Amino acid sequence: MSEFAAIAVFLVLGVGFVLFNFLLSKLIRPKNPNPIKQSTYECGETPVGPAWIQFNVRFYIFCLIFVIFDVEIVFLFPWALVFQSLGLFAFVEMVIFVGILMFGLLYAWRKGLLRWY
Amino acid sequence: MLELDKLIGFVGAQIAALVTALGLGPDWVTLVQLVVAALTLIGFASVMVLGLVYAERKVSAHIQMRVGPMRVGWHGILQTLADAVKLLQKEDITPSNVDRAIYFWAPIVTFVAAFAVYAVIPFGRGLVVTDLNIGILYILAITTFGVIGLLMAGWSSNNKYSLLGGFRSAAQVVSYEVPMALAVIGVVMLTQTLSMVQIVGQQEKFYQWYVWRQPIGFLIYFVAATAEVNRTPFDLPEADSELVAGFVTEYSGMKFAMFFLAEFLNMFTVAAIGTTLFFGGWNGPVLPSWMWFLIKTLAGVFVLMWMRWTYPRLRVDQLMGFAWKFLLPLAILNILITGLFVVLF
């Protein structure tokens, strides 16, 4: 358990370090805001509409494919750890598992989901 | 001085004696030791990033036959320190139509995700804060957390460049995460352990380095890691000429500095993981172990800087196509070949 205490300490102190820097900078920096300075940067022009609008659906599709393969990786890690002791059987099992996923990738590829336009 | 592990053992014992003298239990001893270790690493990380930024400018300059910073200190060696002080004094401009809470937390998430990795990196013999038995899996998990910070920054800024930069960055990092993790699995199949310390322990001799047994895996890791840290030729999220600065466009002052810090920390991290997994970590003759680790890691960082001035930027469709249509099948193939070798021989 103390192994993970180290992680907790690192997370807390990491946040603390950033907040400390913000505070330090707040103490010495000038502050004189005005509406033009605080407007959104758009190459010096007056911004046209908000940025929170519809975006390209490609980003979403790639994230979906990513989730599938990341879950595959989560399955692969325990397999990779023990497979030397399990031998040929475990290897064949994993070839089948990966084969199904690669078939899925091939399908996505043929459907044009991996094309960016 | 050179025996850093003995020095750290001595400091640890002193802390233990001090805390026990105050009448506190062993849990408090561990806690105080961990806090001191974390603060030391924060200091190390800050100084190292200052050095890396200076190195980046000098390397860039000399590759382009310029001299780079020369004025502040000997050969401009204090230039980045001066820049850091300047950033500390800069006004923090928060645009009026940002999503304030997310805008504030984005640099924190990005920095913490980059820094938390340092808890498990073995800097030398006995120089590791905690030897997690899931070390490399923890690193992969926590570095991916950085994507959330980038997305938060891109989305909350309410700026079109930031939004595009954030989305591009997220798409790129998650795409290259898959081949990178698969390349790591190739090594794990041979090591049969996820602990960083044990992985280093298995590569004592030069010929035991995993780069010899995983050459394809190393190449995949190298390309994917370059993309993970948004370095040229994969620097599309920042693409100065088209997206201004991507997700950091609206950030200024210390908030910007934190993104910058995280970026250079990540650069050091991927080089350190590469060293640990493929180049024997801190193993080496004559010199102390931590020095070997730094030499190998900084050599990796130098290659990343060198590449910036060698290759042009990719197009976004080439980038995504390369990850999914080439690197991913190659990484799967690498795993199958490795598995076949292990089963047959």
Image: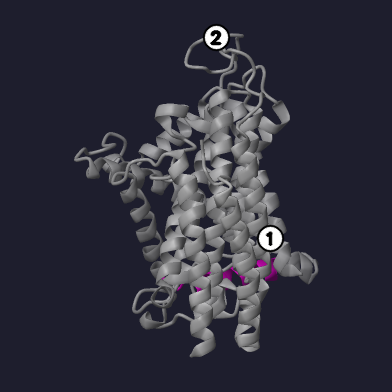
Q: CA distance from mark 2 to mark 1?
A: 44 Å
Mark 2 or 1, nearer chain start: 2
The local crowd at label 1, few if under 14, some if 14 to 19, many if 20 or more residues have their Cα within 10 Å, is few
Specify the segment rendered in magenta.
B1-18
Q: Position of residue B314 (x, y in %)?
A: 39, 42
- Letter of the chain that mark 1 sits on in the rendering: A
Task: Give above or below for A57 relative to B43.
Answer: above
Q: Quadrant of residue A112?
A: top right
Q: Quadrant of residue B215?
A: bottom left
Can you identify the residue that label 2 sits on? Answer: A46
- For the residue marked with disc 2, what is the amino acid? Thr
Q: Nearer the viewer, residue B313 or B301?
A: B313
Task: Give above or below for B258 relative to B321.
Answer: above
The local crowd at label 2, few if under 14, some if 14 to 19, many if 20 or more residues have their Cα within 10 Å, is few
Mark drawn on residue A71: 1
- Residue at 61% over, 9% down: A35
Tell me if B240 is positioned left or right of A5 in this view.
Answer: left
Asked if residue B293 shows in the view, the reply is no
